[in-house]
Image: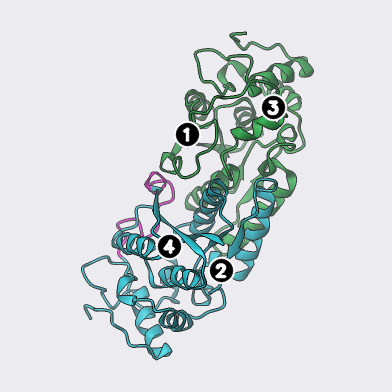
Chain colours: A cyan, B green
């Protein structure tokens, strides 16, 4: 299949693209610049795109930023430290981000006659992010079937939907992913900070998976 | 209610915004620049935004254009003449446009704590555009309920869903819409061409509604 994979440059999405490529699919990586402060991850997304499918597209959504502000991922609000499942991490949500990215990815898929769109949502995010839950994915799929009826058939792939982040690390290790070529930290400095929500999660995932964590952390 | 209304500057969406405003709602008009050739309609959208709610936002999606090309609305393909329901008008579709615009409008609605998003899809477009049909709207609504669960409740309003374009003209006339402040033509010259699909539709709608058509047409 020809698959449009949404790749942020993070551990989950880069692993997703590698795993699908290893299964023999043609992968087109698609990334979004929505004015995130950790633009650094987009460099990792580009590397993944060229490593995996020889193809990478960046959609410029910075025109959206001032309209959907209020998130510490894009604004000047301080990124909170601590574990990801804490209430204060709700602030890191860009409203409706997955629906926006997926609907654009479907537009690209129809234009390029791709067979599927893939997204790396996983169980670890279900608690906080409604747009990472199975019910969102199944409803999005149903909506898209109606939206493009007669203009193509595009599957929605979310193979990690019931994976923990540790399961993703295991899947990535099996697929030969070089995790040093993935970026998680929300702070976007030279190395991972080791203390923000995603860094805490990342460390924990490697530990639980029993896979050596090659990431350089500040702390 | 506070409503984010998707307004292109065309007859349908400008009428929608006026009708909702007349019902006493607070209207924020939202338009999209997706590189359409008939940018002129955006001037009409801005006018409507300021006339109706004193508020207008333009979302720049031109970064998308090269990725979702293939439509005569954005590319250099010649805009076909003739009635809108003809097969060759399929070419005027930007893939997945309504899903993309609606998902962004929901992001804006959540950020601004609005109560609803409104779109002017109508029965005249059901035949060609799957993303104008009732099943698309109801599935989109269901998807969004899941997508933003816990982050707000936003209704999806599509009050013209079973209207013909003539019904919209009648509703607009009742709400006191100045139709000269709406733009339909896909060709984007100084005056409406009178021969492209939307011009043919526009003429017909006024005729069927029994409302005087004040539009200046080239032919």
To which residue does mark 4 refer? Answer: A7
Residues B212 and B87: in front is: B87
Q: Which mark, residue B84?
A: 3
| Disc 3 element | loop
Q: Is residue B134 shown above or below B79?
A: below
Are the residues flagged by discs 1 and 4 in contact, CB closer than 8 Å?
no
Determine if the magenta segment contains residue A72: yes
| Disc 1 element | loop
Whole-percent x and y of residue B66? 44, 41
To which residue does mark 2 refer? Answer: A158
**Badge 3 and badge 4 in a common chain:** no
Determine if the magenta segment contains residue A180: no
Q: CA distance from mark 1 to mark 4?
A: 35 Å
**Badge 3 and badge 1 in a common chain:** yes
Task: Using the rendered view, name the quadrant where residue B14 is placed.
Answer: top right
**Badge 2 and badge 4 in a common chain:** yes
Q: Which mark, residue B95?
A: none
To which residue does mark 1 refer? Answer: B55
């Amino acid at each position: 299949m020809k698959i449009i994979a949404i790749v942020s440059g993070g551990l989950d999405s880069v692993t997703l693209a590698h795993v699908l490529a290893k299964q023999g699919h043609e992968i087109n990586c698609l990334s979004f610049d929505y004015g995130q402060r950790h633009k650094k991850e987009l460099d990792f997304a580009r590397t993944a795109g060229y490593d995996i499918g020889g193809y990478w597209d960046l959609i410029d959504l910075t025109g959206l930023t001032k309209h959907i502000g209020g998130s510490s991922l894009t604004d000047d609000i301080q990124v909170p430290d601590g574990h990801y499942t804490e209430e204060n991490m709700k602030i890191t949500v860009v409203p409706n981000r997955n629906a926006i990215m997926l609907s654009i990815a479907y537009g690209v898929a129809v234009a390029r006659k791709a067979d599927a769109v893939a997204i790396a949502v996983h169980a670890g995010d279900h608690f906080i992010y409604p747009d990472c839950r199975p019910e969102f994915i199944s409803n999005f799929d149903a909506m898209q079937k109606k939206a493009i009826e007669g203009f193509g058939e595009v599957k929605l792939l979310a193979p990690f939907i019931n994976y923990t982040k540790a399961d993703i690390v295991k899947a990535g290790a099996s697929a030969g992913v070089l995790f040093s070529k993935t970026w998680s930290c929300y702070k976007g400095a030279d190395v991972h900070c080791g203390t923000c929500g995603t860094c805490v999660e990342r460390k924990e995932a490697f530990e639980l998976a029993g896979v050596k964590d090659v990431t350089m952390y500040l702390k």
